[in-house]
Amino acid sequence: MISSEFVSRRKLVTADLARRRLDLLLVSKLVNIRYLTGFTGSNALLLQSPDGAVLYTDGRYRVQAAEETECTVKVVQGSLIPRVAKSLPRGRLGFEAAHLTFDAYRTLKAHLPSKVAAMPVEGLVEEHRMVKSEAEIETMRRSAALAWNAFEQTLQHVRPGIRELDLAAELDYRMRRLGAESPAFETIVASGVRSALPHASPTAKALGNGEILLIDMGAFLEGYASDMTRTIFLGAARPKAKRLYRAVLEAQRAALEAVREGTAAKSVDRAARRVLRTAGLERAFVHSTGHGLGLEIHESPRVARKVGIQLKAGMAITVEPGVYLQGFGGIRIEDTIVVNRGGCEILTPASKELIEL
């Protein structure tokens, strides 16, 4: 990411401070610090004010911080919070209420000068993170293509007898070989009746002939996540499984068609549920239709029943309806997409035709 983009982001946050009648913002969530500065270390605080941004970190990151960010960098020995607190000018300090631990908050309060008032803020940086720049979207395109290439390569090794754990390890290995920093989350490989567990962890269970195989995977590339799920069949799919697959695919298509700038997130969720209700499967759809992603695998906005947030061009979300029948198996189809004015761009290039191996 070019430095001018970080400068623009910090300017937007500074403008928000004025609207919220704050003089300063203490950013403690590392992913928000990365978004605003480019710094990728594991210990930092960022103090943002109209006068600029100061990054506090420890001696391990002296060189890295200077290389990754153009902010003023202050290297601290010991705890960062007391040093930041003691340096604060008079005014109202916003802090990230959802990300500062209670212990850290107590330390902050203990060291704050009497002239500083600490005020909790919610979602200030996250609001800006929801809408991606073209540079961010391009990185996510490459992340999604990388995950698909790893999936396509690994598909050649899928056969009855291989363990779920081994297949997950193969997917992770191939993503890293293709340039991923890491999987975006624990890769899900669930076969047979275990595919009815929406967030199943892979086990030593061997894949069996005739079983459903659900794979949910994604990659982190240059900090940005992708996410996709495909359901395949080991051998010929049973008629019931084909019926379920067709229903989920139709639900996903309906949800994708509902996506466009100005549409409420809950309307996308409703479109998927309407199809599954007609098929008598709505109760088997036990999670939301999707979620935002970017620097984190789960971020705003959620695509769920009660979420009235209007989608904006540049938002990156997943669309992932699924049905799960205990004792039989589950089907989920998921893509990473980017909202645009007339609809959406699907970033995950994987085919969604029914695959029988």
Image (cartoon, rainbow, N blue to C red):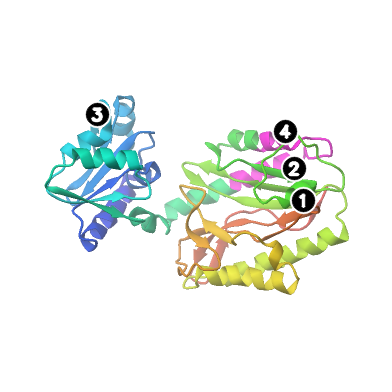
Which of the two discs, 1 and 3, sits closer to the camera?
3
Neighbourhood count class around disc 3 (C-alpha, 10 Å): few under 14, some 14–19, many 20 upward: some
SS for tag 1?
strand
- Mark-to-mark CA distance, 1 and 4: 17 Å
- Indicate left or right for 210 with 101 as reference: right
Q: Which residue is mark 1?
A: 232
Provide residue 52's location: percent of width, then percent of height: 20, 47
Q: Residue drawn 72% across and 36% down?
A: 203
- Indicate left or right for 172 with 297 as reference: right
Which of the two discs, 3 and 2, sits closer to the camera?
3
Q: Is residue 15 visible?
A: yes
Residue 166 got which mark? 4
Q: Amino acid at mark 4?
A: Asp
Residue 76 got which mark? 3
Q: Amino acid at mark 3?
A: Val
Q: Residue drawn 43% across and 56% down?
A: 132
The magenta span reads 145-171
- Mark-to-mark CA distance, 3 and 4: 44 Å
- Mark-to-mark CA distance, 1 and 3: 52 Å
Q: State if disc 1 and disc 2 touch (CB < 8 Å).
A: yes
Provide residue 24's location: percent of width, then percent of height: 21, 50
Q: Residue drawn 64% across and 68% down?
A: 272
Q: Nearer the viewer, residue 158 or 322?
A: 322
Q: Is residue 71 visible?
A: no
**First of labels 1, 3 by sequence position:** 3
Q: Amino acid at mark 1?
A: Ile
Indicate the quadrant containing the N terminus: top left, top right, bottom left or bottom right.
top left
- Mark-to-mark CA distance, 2 and 1: 10 Å
SS for tag 2?
helix
- Indicate left or right for 56 with 30 as reference: left
**First of labels 2, 1 by sequence position:** 2
